[in-house]
Image: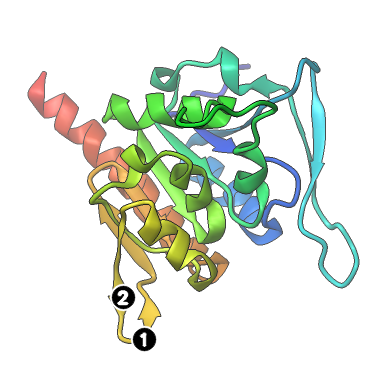
Amino acid sequence: MTTQTKGKIGVLIEEHFDPTEYKKFNEYFPQQGYEVEYISHLWGNSAITFGSNPENDQIECHVTVTTEVNDINPADYKGIICIGAYAMDRLRYQVNVKKGEKNQAPAVAFIRKVMSAGDVKVGTICHSLWLLCADKDLLAGRKVTCAHNIVCDVENAGADVVFDGDVTADLVIDDNLITGKHPGVVDEFMEAFVAEIEKTGKAQKVGV
C-alpha cells in the first residue's frame, strides 16, 4: 500500500553532519506529510554512508545516501535543506579549480539551480550557509542568519546578516530562503520551513 505524501524535502548531507538536526528532520517532516530524501555527491558510487559529528567521542548517527546530486531535478522537491555542521564545507570541494572560475562542485551547481527556480524553498541552518558562500551571486543582498562562527564568511559573500542585539537572529525568511541560527532553534526552523512551503502551495492554488 502506497502512502500519499505532500511531496519531498531534499536534505543535502555529507560526513560530519549535525546529529540533532538529522534526528529532528526524520521525525518532524514525515509527521507533517513530507518525505525526507538525503542527497549528496556519491563520487561514482551507488551509495555512501556518512557519519554525524561525534559527541562524547561517539558517532551517534549514520545515513546511507543513494541519491546523487548530479541526477536530480529541483522541481521534484518542495524544498531543499542544507544540513548543519561541517557537511556543507565538504560539499564545496572541487578536485580541480581554475582562477576566476566559479565553484563547480556538484552540490554548488545544484543549489544554483534551486535558487534560480524561485518556487523551491531553500533552508540553511548553523554552518550550512557555507555552501551558498561558494558563489557570491547566491547571497548578494539576501537577509540571513547563521552561526556566529561563520558571520565573516557570510558577510564576505555579500549577505546581510540580521542581528538581535549582540547575537545573530534565530530565524530569518527572505523570499525562498529560510535560515536558522543553530540546532537550538531547529524546531522553529522546521515549522517555518513547512509553513513557507504550504504558503506557496496555497498561493499557487489560488492562482489556478
Residue 100 figure quarter: top left
User: How would you rate the neighbour count of disc 2 (Cα within 10 Å): few for under 14, some for 14-19, many for 20 or more?
Assistant: some
Q: Is residue 69 left or right of residue 140?
A: right
**197 or 3: which is nearer to us?**
197
Q: Amino acid at mark 2?
A: Phe
Q: Residue at x 81, y 18 (%)?
A: 45
Query: In the picture shown, does residue 5 fall above or below 31?
Result: above
| Residue at image point 65% right, 51% down | 22
Quadrant that contains the N terminus: top right
Quadrant occupied by the C terminus? top left
Neighbourhood count class around disc 1 (C-alpha, 10 Å): few under 14, some 14–19, many 20 upward: few
- Three-letter code for the amino acid on which mark 1 is drawn: Asp
Residue 8 at least partly seen = no
The answer to whether 198 is drawn above or below residue 24 in the figure is above
In this view, the residue farthest toward the front is: 99
Element class at badge 2: strand
Residue 92 shows in the view: yes
Say which residue appears at 26% left-offset and 51% top-offset: 142
Point out which mark residue 15 bears: none
Residue at image point 40% right, 29% down: 112
Specify the color scheme. rainbow
Count of marks, rendered view: 2
* Residue 206, x across and y down, in percent: 10, 28
Which mark is on residue 166?
Answer: 1
Q: Position of residue 123 (x, y in %)?
A: 43, 46
As drawn, the residue found furthest toward the right would be: 57
- Residue 155 sits in quarter: bottom left
Q: Secondary structure at mark 1?
A: loop
With respect to residue 135, does 208 lie above or below?
Answer: above
Circle 2 residue: 163
Q: Nearer the viewer, residue 81 or 45?
A: 45
Q: Is residue 188 left or right of residue 63?
A: left
